[in-house]
Image: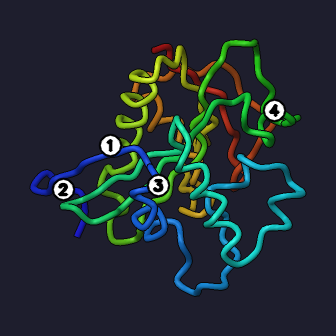
Amino acid sequence: MGASAATRVEVHPATAERFADVAAILGPKKLDAPVCWCLSYRVPNAEYNRLRGPGRPDRLKEFCRRDPAPGVVGYVDGVPAGWCGFGPRSELPRLVNSRTIPSPDDVPVWSVFCFVIRPPFRRQGLSARLLEGTIAYARANGTPMLEAYPVDPLDGRISPSLAYVGTTSLFEAAGFDRVQPTSGRSGGATRWLMRLKL
């Protein structure tokens, strides 16, 4: 079951009312597994390392109660299938303090930094639909520019666990331009700073 042409795909902001769907995508199969819950960019390292058990999903749910939403949820025929996480760069401690992905200027960008697709829906183009929904949501919220830090696999394959930041081809297809390579790496591949003016 995937996001083929015969299926219905919808993308919606990740509000608190949709948190059960967010959890269906981001939550681990084993309840005590130490998954990120899309928090590693959002909270300081000390807080992230301190959060355990239900602390991480509870913290993400707090973000889902805020405006703007911390991401979008993609549905395939009504089933929660994928996630794209983002936020104002100025509110993301990991990026504010990053030495490998520096900001080239002070434009108030939103950063797109996480894709999660549930296994049955992978390799069906859902990441592109999630990115389209993210662009539409950012535009509706008056964001002047989106920024992303995807990998350039250089014709090689990147494992899904390392490609959570997306690929340069995904963002280029959505109209993003390469600004500069960064010293950040994922799976040995260079991460590029890319932008889309809205």
Tell me whether circle 2 and circle 3 mark residues in contact (CB < 8 Å). Answer: no
Q: What amino acid is at disc 3?
A: Ala
| x, y percent for residue 145 | 54, 18
The residue shown at (66%, 32%) is 192
**Badge 2: residue crowd in 10 Å (few <14, some 14–19, many ≥20):** some
Measured in 3D between alpha carbons, the distance from the residue under mark 2 to the one under mark 1, in whole angstroms, is: 12 Å
Measured in 3D between alpha carbons, the distance from the residue under mark 2 to the one under mark 4, in whole angstroms, is: 38 Å
Of circles 2 and 3, which is in front? Answer: 3
| x, y percent for residue 5 | 13, 51
Q: What amino acid is at disc 4?
A: Val
Looking at this view, is 156 or 138 the one in front? Answer: 138
Q: What amino acid is at disc 1?
A: Arg
> Which numbered tag is attached to residue 96?
4
The residue shown at (50%, 45%) is 71
Residue indicated by mark 2: 4
> Which numbered tag is attached to residue 16?
3
Looking at this view, is 178 or 79 the one in front? Answer: 79
Against 34, is 93 above or below?
above
Of circles 3 and 4, which is in front? Answer: 3
**Badge 4: residue crowd in 10 Å (few <14, some 14–19, many ≥20):** some
Q: Secondary structure at mark 1?
A: helix
Q: Secondary structure at mark 2?
A: loop
| x, y percent for residue 134 | 42, 35
Residue indicated by mark 1: 129
| Sooner in the amino-acid sequence: mark 3 or mark 4 | 3
Measured in 3D between alpha carbons, the distance from the residue under mark 2 to the one under mark 3, in whole angstroms, is: 28 Å
Against 70, is 183 above or below?
above
Q: Secondary structure at mark 3?
A: helix
> Which numbered tag is attached to residue 70?
none
The residue shown at (59%, 28%) is 110
